[in-house]
Image: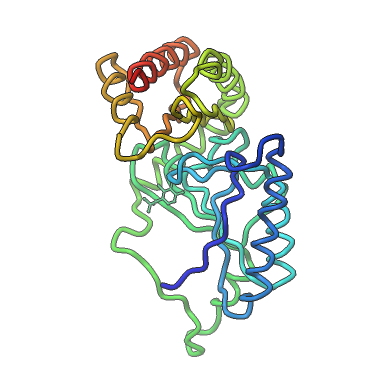
Amino acid sequence: MDVITAPSPAGCYAEKGESYEDYARRQFEAMEILLEKHAHEVAAVIIEPLVQCAGGMRMYHPIYLSLLREACDRYQVHLIADEIAVGFGRTGTMFACEQADISADFLCLSKGLTAGYLPLSVVLTTEDIYQAFYDDYTTLKAFLHSHSYTGNPLACRVALATLDIFAKDNVIENNRHLSQAMDKATRPLREHPHVGEVRQQGMILAIEMVDAAKKPYPWQERRGVQVYQYALEKGALLRPLGNIIYFMPPYVITPEQIYQLAEIALGGIDRATQD
Ligand SMILES: *Cc1c(COP(=O)(O)O)cnc(C)c1O
């Protein structure tokens, strides 16, 4: 499928002295131009709210989402929020879109929906879109789309059990304390000569390794893998994304384990950047 790609609003690309918010506003200008030019042929804008995860845990200011919602309404283009990774408390609120006080026309959810225990994904949509396909059988307007295992009862039961935990336990509030521990535990890394940026959004924290000139290491050197291997020796699983080491821990982690993880990350980064 042909897609049009807009430049990332991620604050890690901001000019020196430029705030995340100013950068997001500036990057939105390119999105506005794309919408103006292509709205007539575009079905939807799809975005990962607040954090572009697999793209390198790139974080951006919520103003981008507010501006995008407003522009999608203006140009009559649907907005799809892919909250598969960021949904269910990961960014500090139940859903990342809440931080921009917006809602999407389609919301994609998975991962945290079952706390990772069984595979299940869902797409939520608005009443308007639901109604567009809901009619008498003879109008043939039904949206016929399914998978072999759609609505798997066991996976759905796990999702309900997970939602019960969110309703009963103070998960979001507890995560606030855990994310503060993540911030504190990684303070020594912020001063590290081979760390370009430590960024955090709720329960996601990313550490970017850089060379002595504060430039990214060539990806071919696979420095992240060295951190991964070091961490494995120490009993931790630190999966890198290129030169980026990140924490995206399960919510049952304890502050003690967060400090342990940060210490292991520091040791691994020391080793991976010593030459
Ligand atoms: C994991 C992930 C997906 C893939 O979801 P599946 O349900 O495995 O297809 C899509 N988008 C984001 C943002 C993800 O993190």
Q: Residue at x 49, y 24 (%)?
A: 195
Question: Quarter holding the N terminus?
Answer: bottom left
Q: How is the image coloured?
A: rainbow
Relative to the observer, which residue lies in front, 47 or 111? 47
Q: Where on the picture, by quarter, is residue 231?
A: top left
Horizontal side of 269 relative to 85 (left or right) equals left
Q: Residue at x 57, y 56 (%)?
A: 7
Question: Quarter holding the C terminus?
Answer: top left
Farthest residue to the front: give it. 213
Horizontal side of 97 relative to 207 (left or right) equals right
Relative to the observer, which residue lies in front, 222 or 123? 222
Q: Residue at x 64, y 42 (%)?
A: 14
Position above or below: 235 against 65:
above
Whole-percent x and y of residue 253? 45, 19
Relative to the observer, which residue lies in front, 68 or 196? 196
Whole-percent x and y of residue 267? 37, 13
Horizontal side of 203 relative to 72 (left or right) equals left
Number of marks in the rendered image: 0
Whole-percent x and y of residue 28? 68, 56
Farthest residue to the bottom: give it. 138
